[in-house]
Image (spheres, rainbow, N blue to C red):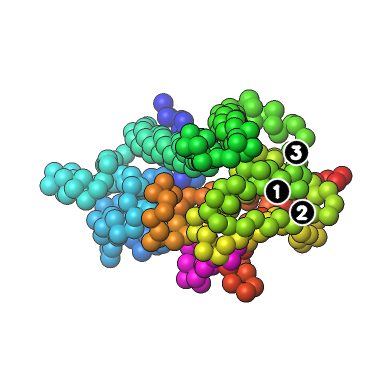
Amino acid sequence: MIVTANHAGRILVVDDQPANLRVVSTLLSRQGYEVDNAGDGPTALELCRRHAPDLVLLDMMMPGMDGFGLIAQLKQHEELLRIPVVFLTAAHDRDLLLRAFDAGAVDYVTKPFTPEELLARVSAHIGLKLTRDRLERVAREREELVNLVAHDLKNPLSSVLFASDLLMSGAARPERAPHYLHVIRESAQDAIDYIHRYLEMQSAAQQARSTAAPPATCDLGEAMEWLVRRYEMQLEARGMRLIVRMPSDEARVAIDGLVLRQVAENLVTNAIKYAQAGGELELSARNGAQGYRQLIAQDRGPGISLHRQRDLFKPFVRLDEHTGSDPMSSGLGLSLARQIIANAGGHHWYEDREGGGARFVIERPEARGS
């Protein structure tokens, strides 16, 4: 009985005998596998570099670069290290087979082989490889989600700590106490909203409902007003002046308001951390490319050197790697912000500000019908 492949997968068959290549590749293709063929080691290595297979069926004895040489070459490339290799061999020499396993082979099939045996071994190793890849992908996604949640909860919780510290220390003027209480309440609600949104992102049913729902929109002016309410006094406490240039008309853009605030407040908190010496932060809105609106945060701080700009939006890169002002800083903020905006169909970039300082731009499509 022929074993039917239970998993899709790409297999590279390497053999210097064209007849063997034809027989093996035909057998595998009929079982639903994608099959590439190589008649020698260098060709096989190039195919692996171009598109890494899920399994290599490799003839042990070939002229030039033999199977051992090819495995040694695969081990020189990190992205190819974990490709399972099954030897096809006519050899029954025990020492040679042990050498093959020592080299990195996971299994072998002796020639002449039966189709059932070959397909059973291929199916087992392909299944293990794809299962491992799936588990690693899930682990990466969970790690990314943990990083995202931890980073985004940091801003509202920092606002809670700032406002509560002022109230508990007695340093807050009595007329400002209601405002600080409002900051605490609103920041806590934002943290809860972030958690709810991340949980919904993990729900397939919720994703299906979201796809059918009308796209979310928000007003840039309202987002800027929220930033002022949330951070004006924090900026003041650090000796920074907040300048706000509101849009002259309704500026609705295609993005959820919570998401826009989440990204924009990261720019404000970065200015607080890295641009205090400049003494100001300016928030403004303007027209971008046709059909787009921009939210801009710019300061008069030291700006960002050219060699640092290349790494600015990479994960775990901090704006100032020498600063000790924020031990909680992970360097994830700008990377996550750009990813969030890009996933929503927009753009997020940095540019030097005329006269000195940094300028960060968030560009979103205008909401239809606005």
User: Which residue carries the number 3 mark?
Assistant: 215
Depth order, front residue of 50/273: 273
Q: Which mark is residue 265?
A: none
| Residue at point 79%, 46% (across, down) | 252
Q: CA distance from mark 3 to mark 1?
A: 21 Å
Question: Mark 3 Cα within 10 Å, few/some/many (few <14, many 20+)?
Answer: few
Q: Which numbered disc, 3 or 1, marks the residue closer to the eye?
A: 1
| Residue at point 58%, 57% (across, down) | 240
Q: Where does the image place residue 167, in percent across and percent down from the top left?
A: 52, 35
Mark 2 or mark 3, which has the lower sequence index? 3
Q: CA distance from mark 1 to mark 2?
A: 7 Å
Quadrant position of residue 223? top right
User: Which residue carries the number 2 mark?
Assistant: 246
Q: Where does the image place residue 103, in percent across and percent down from the top left?
A: 21, 51
User: Which residue carries the number 1 mark?
Assistant: 224
* Residue 306 part of the magenta-drawn span: yes
- Evaluate if marks 1 and 2 touch, with contact meaning CB atoms under 8 Å apart: yes
In the image: residue 106, left or right of residue 51: left
Q: Which numbered disc, 2 or 3, marks the residue closer to the eye?
A: 2
Q: CA distance from mark 2 to mark 3?
A: 24 Å
Depth order, front residue of 325/363: 325
Q: Amino acid at mark 2?
A: Met
Q: Residue furthest left?
A: 95
* Residue 234 part of the magenta-drawn span: no
Instruction: State the SS at label 1.
Output: helix
